[in-house]
Image (cartoon, helix red, strand yellow):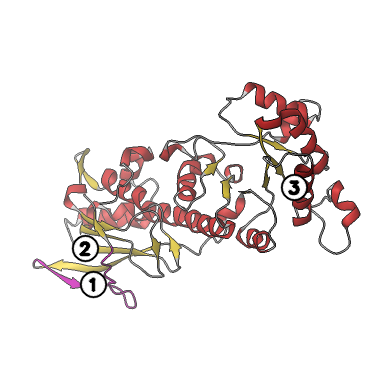
Amino acid sequence: MRPRLQPEIFHLPVEKMRDGYYSDTYFNRARQILASDAHHPVLRMQVFQRSAAVLCGIDEAIAILKLCAGWYDGGQWIDGWERLSVRALFDGDAIAPYETVLTVEGDYQLFAHLETTYLGVLTRRTRIASNAHDIVEAAGGKQVLFFPARFDHHLVQTGDGYAAYISGALGVSTDANAEWWGARGMGTVPHALIAAYGGDTVLATKKFAEFTDSAVNVIALVDFDNDCVTTSLEVASALGARLWGVRLDTSGTLVDKSIWPQMGTFRPTGVVPQLVRNVRAGLDAAGFEHVRIVVSGGFDADRICQFEREGVPVDAYAVGSAFFERAGEFDFTADVVAAQRDGAWVPCHKVGRPERPNPRLALVS
């Protein structure tokens, strides 16, 4: 049996989830009505979404059910997990449109209030994992760095980093991104540090190398003066073998100085293929073949594919908000599909949403 992440790793707000604080009100009301009526229907719920995708968030959804299924009896919480039967796929599984990824069977009162929360984590994590898969595949084996933390709320970093990790994006920018698999965040010399040293990229990079653990790769941002070739050579000369790589992050509204004589036959702004070739040629000619080139600034799967088709000498792609694309494409839905009557399961579903059994589902203990 493949391992799953343990519920404790998610640091869920258990009490609030049990109370239905994060749940759509109508689910809380459904639970209240059933309890008031002393009605205990035993139902089977199935969960699916409508796109080809890479599944993620399933262990988190299971954790919600394990820790938050149940009911209050006179103010005392009665755990409901042992009264449920749950089957699920695994994080990282490739899934087809409408494929059932999770089923929950049991007294509906035990888990009615949790539908909003487990669908939410499945939707977000699957979107990140699916986008990461496409980006990693486009990179063709080159390293992909997951750098979108600044574009969303800090509380989503850990799960998002894990979703990217299971799809092959191994480098992340924050420790929170890497928490669930025990790694640490990585990064480059930031523009702000260069500014703090008076705009001197070489000095800022030397200070970075001096006061940072020697196990950390030194990656210099080289676009501060809009002259990536010259700055790359200056940094490489100053740091030698200690320099792991340079990162090109030229703004989409600027044309790097090395491009000026070559303008006229291609779009010159930002990090374009010719800029990467210019930097690579300059480094190689000066004997710095070991220095890698990282590119960033608006890269997504399509743009990476273009660079790879053209054979642009990139060693790693740092990608940001593209991991958040395609909102709505991976929304999950939960439907009741069967009910237990006189000890037997009988179909019970709205028109057009029948049960779709999936032999790939594994019983969750």
Task: Identify residue for label 3.
Answer: 280
At horizontal 61% and vertical 36% (from top left) the residue drawn is 187
At horizontal 41% and vertical 70% (from top left) the residue drawn is 97
**Magenta stretch: residue 136 in it?**
no
Identify residue type, mark 1: Cys
Residue 250 falls left or right of residue 298: right
Residue 69 falls left or right of residue 136: left
Task: Identify residue for label 1.
Answer: 348
* 312 versus 146 height, above or below: below
Q: Position of residue 259 (x, y in %)?
A: 85, 52
Identify residue type, mark 3: Arg
Identify residue type, mark 2: Leu
Residue 249 falls left or right of residue 345: right
Tag 2's secondary structure? Answer: strand
Q: Which region is colored magenta?
A: 343-360
Q: Considering only order in the chain, which callout, 3 or 1, is on the residue closer to the N terminus?
A: 3
Q: Considering only order in the chain, which callout, 2 or 1, is on the residue closer to the N terminus?
A: 2
